[in-house]
Image: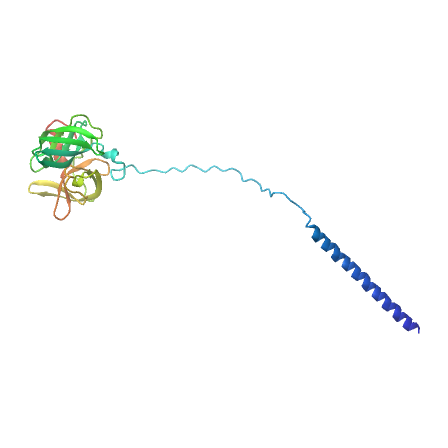
Amino acid sequence: MRARILAVALAVLVAAGTAVLAVRVGGAEARQQARLAEGPTIAWQAPTTLPAAPPTTAAPVEIELPAPTPATAPFSSFFDGTMRVRNIQPGVLGVGTAFAVGDGTWALTNRHVVADARTLELESWDGEPRGTATVVAVGPPTTDLALLRLPSRVEGALHLAAGTVAVDTELVAGGFPEAHHFTRSVGSLLAVTTQDGMDMLVTDVPAAPGSSGSPLLDPSGTVVGIIFGGSYSGYTLAVPADDAIDLLATQQLTP
C-alpha cells in the first residue's frame, strides 16, 4: 500500500516538473517573440574611423624631351623661309620651290624652275604672298641652280652644310609636289654619285614635279642638298650643298 502511494506521489512530482519546465520554456519563447516583434536593439551606430595616412609628396620626375627635328617639328620651325615659285610666261605657268638663305633677302632654287621667266611670283609655305623675285645668278648646267633676290627680308633662312653626307642619313624635304599645298617628306640618303659631270645625291625621299628647288635637310636642319628631279627607278635626285655654296660665293654670300 505504501509503495503504491509513493509511486503516485512520484508521478505527480514528475508531471508537475514537466509542467513547470514547459511553462518556463514557453515563457522564454514568448519573450523572444516579443523582442523580435519590437525590432532589434541597436548596439552601436557610428562611422568607422580609420587613422589618416600621412601625406606624401611625389618626387618630381625629370623627362628629357628630344630636340625637335625637321621631320617632327611644326613646319614653321624649319620651313618658314620655304616658298612656292610661280614662273609666269605667256600661256605658261611653271611651279617650283625656293628657300631663303643668307640674311633672308636671297633664295635658292633650280635653274630650270626660273628659266625664261617673265615674272617670278613668291608665296610662303602657308599661302601668304611674298612679292616677286629677280634672278641674280645661275650656276653652270651641271648644277641646275639659281640664286634669287627677294623683294624683302624673309624669316627662316636656312644654312648650308659643306662636305660629304653619310649614306643612310635621315633626310627631310619640304616643297610643293604636283604644285599642291606644302608637303614635308622623309627618307634617307642612298648614294652619292656623278653622272654626265653632275654630282648628285640619290635619295628615297618622296618628291614629284613641283618639288624642284626644295631644300633637303639633315636631322639638324641644315641643308645638304637641293632637289632637282627624279630617276625612272623612282629615286629623288638632289644637287649637293657644296655646289650651292659655290654659287653663293659668286655674290660674296655666306652659306
Outermost residue on the top side: it is 152
Q: Residue at x 14, y 32 (%)?
A: 108
In the figure, 127 relative to 12: above or below? above
Which quadrant holds residue 117? top left
> In the image, 22: left or right of 117?
right
Q: What colour scheme governs how the chains and residues are painted in the rendered image of this protein?
A: rainbow
Residue 219 in the image: state x and y as whole percent: 24, 38
Count of marks overlaid on the render: 0
Direction right: furthest residue? 1
For the C terminus, the quadrant is top left
Residue drawn at the location 90% of the way across and 70% of the way down: 6
Above or below 234: residue 5? below
**Residue 33 or residue 136, whichever sits in front:** 33
Q: Nearer the viewer, residue 98 or 68?
A: 98
Residue shown at the point (70%, 50%) measured from the top left: 38
Tell me what residue is drawn at x 18 percent, y 31 percent.
100
Is residue 53 left or right of 60 when viewed as pictured? Answer: right
Percent x, y for residue 14?
83, 66
Left-right relation of 50 to 116 = right
Vertical placement of residue 89 versus 13, above or below? above
Identify the image quadrant of residue 149: top left
On the image, the x and y values in percent for residue 2 come to 93, 72
Position in image of residue 118 (x %, y %) = 8, 31
For the N terminus, the image quarter is bottom right
